[in-house]
Image (tube, grey):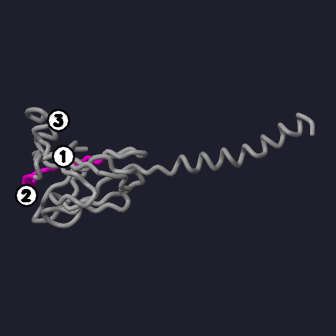
Amino acid sequence: MNTAKIYKRMRILMVPLLVIMTISGCGEVDTKPIVAGGNPPLIKFEGTGALEQLYVMGPFTFEQLKQDRIDGDEKDYYMWQLAPSRDFRVSRLSITYGIVPDGFKQVYPANGKSPEPLIEGKIYNILAPSASANFKPVLFMIDNGRAVEVPPSKITDK
């Protein structure tokens, strides 16, 4: 077989391979927490990543967030932090605030102390950094005993 034929066959095989690689690379969906239920809320997730950490931060007021002014160190607002002991795909996770699920370790508060209860009318931030996917923070509050997402438009006035 001559070199030209070999080269032509290689190009023919490369096209489907490139298509497969492109399609599989586009399957990433950002990790986004979803709050539901009451107080304490249930945290579920959308996305394709593997959870690396879970942070719940707060309490914040609308005024603090609108002015982008958080007094003190950001760590002053850590309420709860979990770290998984193995690979947990976010699409299958459901975590109740304050309850450490099997396969997770509570990082904060230390020594197994329970996190502070969530306060009606205050705003909280959930961050869920994930491997193999970007992540989006979510703001939520407890309103009439129910956990509800706070849309960014309520903070930015846009």
Front position among marks 1 and 3: 1
Residue linked to disc 1: 107
Determine whether 64 is above or below 124 in the image: above
Q: Which region is colored magenta?
A: 113-128
Left or right of 18 in this view: 106: left
Mark count = 3
Q: Say which of 84 and 93 sits in front.
A: 84
Mark 1 or mark 3: name the one nearer the start of the chain. Answer: 3
**Residue type, numbered disc 3:** Asp
Q: Which mark is residue 120?
A: 2
Residue linked to disc 3: 68
Disc 3 secondary structure class? loop
Mark 1 or mark 2: name the one nearer the start of the chain. Answer: 1
Task: Specify whether residue 127 is painted magenta.
Answer: yes
Determine whether 35 is above or below 123 in the image: below
Disc 1 secondary structure class? strand
C-alpha span from label 2 to label 3: 21 Å
Residue in the picture at 38% in, 59% down: 91
C-alpha span from label 1 to label 3: 27 Å
Task: Specify whether residue 121 is painted magenta.
Answer: yes
